Image: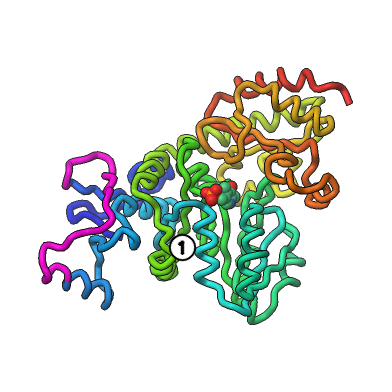
Amino acid sequence: MPKSDDQPDRQYQGASTKSVHGGAARDKGFHAMTTPIVQTATFTFKNTAELIEFLDAKVYGGELDREEYARYGNPSCWSLEARIAQLEGAGDALMYPSGMSAVTSLFLTALRPGTHIIMTDDCYRRTRQFCLTTLKKFGIETSIVPMCNYDALEAAIIPGKTRFIFTETPTNPYLRVMDLARLVELARTNRALTLLDTTFATPVNLRPLEYGIDFVMHSATKYFGGHNDVLGGAIAGDAGRIKALKDARGMFGNVIDPHQAFLIERGLKTLAVRVRHQNEAALQVARFLEEHAKIDRVYYPGLQSHPDHEIARAQMSGFGGVVSFEVAGDIHATSGFIDRLRIPYIAPSLGGTESLIEQPAYVSYYDLSPQERQEAGIGDNLVRFALGIEDAEDIIADLDDALRQVPAS
Ligand SMILES: *Cc1c(COP(=O)(O)O)cnc(C)c1O
């Protein structure tokens, strides 16, 4: 990662210091505090000698401290990528224009026909769809196993063919948490790589590379950007593997726009402050809901009632800002409750400053019949509440008001 000469990259201890300063390339060229938005399609060379110096470094491997053409990279991204790498404790990180762009590029780059991947069932629907349709078209098979079922996971491994085990932690919408040490041991024994989507955890709450996970991916649209105003994706891992992804990105052309990178870097500065607040507020909200007569069940890894509470406590430094729950009532009682809320917006997504709420039966699974939804484990009365940075007392008062009017069932 290119750095300015006068300020060596420093390693910091805390997630908040890293969020603000990690990997910051202090380019004094413009004396700007912030990373400039370098709005250009190409980069110029003073003369042929400078061009040759660059090409030597590029072709024969040397320190590259500049860019040549914007599809290969843009300086607006350098400190963002370095900062994410530092937050994850990774060799390097790479930005993409969306989370889906990150995960699909990784699979298309790392897999070839005849290989096989395993993914867990409680995970992002588009990722699963991509594996079952596009990857299948290229002769790559996908097995889907129940989340946190390690025996099923082991049984699904095809020796010599299984190249990736892909999972999420915590998952959507049930916030299941994988035992990472166990997962890594299984994968390594069988020479498979691991990819973990930890969008819901962020490196503030979970640092999967410390457990030996090979690649971490994030939808930067969520907590990294943090303001519900920009899309982005990131992958972090070993520097050599990230370099291979960067070369592939130069061919795919799915490079992040400099303005997008600027917004994500700005959002990232408050990542730790936001996430720590959300951890605290979400735990209070989850406890409130668990006690409430109009609520059937709450899914939050910070609660003792959650099936993965113990492993979440051991692995994570906070339980995140998403709380899922089931209202005591049918699909209409549930949507009526949602419609009465004043604070959260009805919208997909999560991780921004504004609270968002959704009823998965509608938002993500509307195309399925009630029967299919039930088979997918999505109840009509399920609600996903993704906390923003509002105060817990206000959120709780809002929930309480709206729940009071849920008819007794
Ligand atoms: C949103 C999301 C994605 C997809 O990311 P985009 O930025 O929307 O492309 C992938 N995984 C998880 C867990 C997500 O929440």
Disc 1 under 8 Å from ligand 1? The reply is no
Residue 48: in magenta span: yes
Give the x, y percent position of residue 65. Answer: 23, 62
Q: Quadrant of the N terminus?
A: bottom left
Q: Quadrant of the C terminus?
A: top right
* Disc 1 packing (10 Å; few <14; some 14–19; many ≥20): many
Q: In the image, what residue occupies the spot 80% across and 38% down?
A: 380
The correct choice, above or below, for 98 with respect to 211 in the image is: above
**Along the line of sight, which residue is nearer the eye, 208 or 35?**
35
Residue 148: in magenta span: no
Q: In the image, what residue occupies the spot 46% across and 49% down?
A: 232
Residue to which mark 1 is pinned? 237
Horizontal side of residue 107 vs 404, given as left or right = left
Range drawn in magenta = 29-51
User: For residue 401, which quarter of the picture?
Assistant: top right
Horizontal side of residue 172 vs 50, given as left or right = right
User: For residue 111, which quarter of the picture?
Assistant: bottom right
The correct choice, above or below, for 369 with respect to 330 in the image is: below
